Image (cartoon, grey):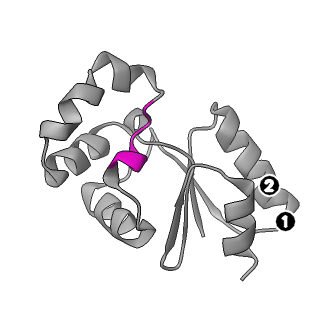
Amino acid sequence: MLFVEYPKCSTCKKAKKWLDDHSCVYEDRHIVEDNPSAEELKRWHAASGLPLKKFFNTSGMLYKQMNLKDRLPDMTEQEQIELLASNGMLIKRPILVKDETVLVGFRETEWETILQQ
């Protein structure tokens, strides 16, 4: 399993504690120091079944500074993926990748259901 996080993020800390409390084995990856590539983001987006907008950290300062709420609707999917790949702070976190399953954000009940399989 791959756990992509920003260590200072409180949600990421909760998710990591949950993984540790449930004895999950995972590879930890810093989302800013080792930003996901466009190819990874494409694969994760496809596997997640989520709209691409769910991959954006819409509450983040950078998202707001760049006025992405208004700009995203006019961008192609490829442009959005390349933008996400340009800066880890734009990406919603944490991201958990397990086989062909990708979870974005931490919702304990969802993680429990997926990881207990």
Query: Residue 18 has which mark?
Result: 2
- Mark 1 and mark 2 in contact? Answer it, CB < 8 Å: yes
Quadrant assignment for the C terminus: bottom right
Q: Quick check: 13 above or below 111?
A: above
Q: Secondary structure at mark 2?
A: helix
Q: Quick check: 71 above or below 85?
A: above
Q: Position of residue 55 (x, y in %)?
A: 40, 48
3D distance between C-alphas at marks 1 and 2 = 6 Å
- Residue at image position (72%, 72%) is 113
How packed mark 1 is, by other alpha carbons closer than 10 Å (few <14, some 14-19, many 20 or more), is few
Left or right of residue 56: residue 102: right
Q: Position of residue 91 (x, y in %)?
A: 42, 42
Number of numbered discs overlaid on the protein picture: 2
Q: Quadrant of residue 115?
A: bottom right
The amino acid marked with disc number 2 is Trp
Q: Position of residue 28 (x, y in %)?
A: 61, 55
